[in-house]
Amino acid sequence: MTTHMPTRTGSPLRQAALILGVVFLLVGVLGFIPGITTNYGSMTFAGHHSGALLLGVFQVSILHNIVHLLFGVWGLAASRTSPAARAFLIWGGVIYLVLLVYGLFVNYESGANFVPLNTADNWLHLVLGVVMIALGVLLSRSDRRTA
C-alpha cells in the first residue's frame, strides 16, 4: 500500500504559477533599473510618450512595471493552492490575450495606448497568453490525476 505524500514544492500546476510569479516580479523590478531599461529618463507614469524600453525592446512605463509587479504577487499568492494556481494561469493568460487584441487595434501614438504597448509587447502578450492558458489547462489535468 502506497500513500501519496505532497511534495514541499507542490504540484507542477502550483510550481508553474510560482515560477511565472517570480518572473513577473523580476520583470517588474528590472523595468525600474536604468541600463536594463534603456531611455530610462524618458519613462512616464503611463501613456505612449514613455520612451523607456525594457531590454531595449519592450516599451514600459511606471504603470506597466506596476502591472508586472501585481501579476507577480498574484502568481506567488496563487501558487499556494492548485485551484488558485489554475485560475492565475488561465485568467492571467486571458488577460494577456485581451492585451494582445487591444495592442493590435490601438494606434501606438494615441492617448488610448495608456499602458504603453509596442509590437514587441504584442508578440510577448501572444506567447504569454497561449503559454499561461496551456499550462493552466494541461497541468490541472495532471494535477487531478495525481490527487
Image (cartoon, grey):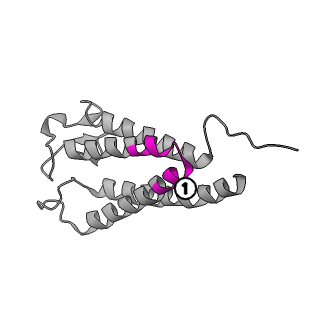
Type of amino acid at the residue the image marks with label 1: Leu
- Image location (x, y in percent) of residue 38: 24, 36
Q: Residue at horizontal 42%, vertical 59%?
A: 91
Q: Which residue of the protein is positioned furthest toward the right in this rendering?
A: 1
From the viewer's perspective, tell me whether residue 1 is left or right of residue 5: right
User: Which quadrant would residue 98 be assigned to in this image?
Assistant: bottom left
From the viewer's perspective, tell me whether residue 147 is left or right of residue 18: right
Q: Residue at horizontal 38%, vertical 41%?
A: 73
Question: Camera-side residue: 49 or 144?
Answer: 144
Q: Which residue of the protein is positioned furthest toward the top in this rendering?
A: 34
- Image location (x, y in percent) of residue 121: 32, 54
Q: Residue at horizontal 47%, vertical 56%?
A: 87
- Is most of the magenta stretch helix, strand or loop? helix
- Image location (x, y in percent) of residue 31: 28, 37
Question: Camera-side residue: 59 or 11?
Answer: 11
Q: Which residue of the protein is positioned furthest toward the bottom in this rendering?
A: 105
- Image location (x, y in percent) of residue 143: 64, 53
The 10 Å Cα crowd at callout 1, few under 14, some 14 to 19, many 20 or more, is many
Residue 56 sits inside the magenta stretch: no
Residue 61 in view, yes or no:
no
The residue that mark 1 highlights is 135
Q: How many marks?
A: 1
Residue 142's place in the image compared with 26, above or below, is below
On-image quarter of the N terminus: top right
Q: Residue at horizontal 29%, vertical 41%?
A: 54
In the image, which residues are magenta? 74-87
Disc 1 is placed on an element classified as helix
Residue 20 in view, yes or no:
yes
User: Which quadrant would residue 43 be assigned to in this image?
Assistant: top left
From the viewer's perspective, tell me whether residue 18 is left or right of residue 100: right
From the viewer's perspective, tell me whether residue 9 is left or right of residue 26: right
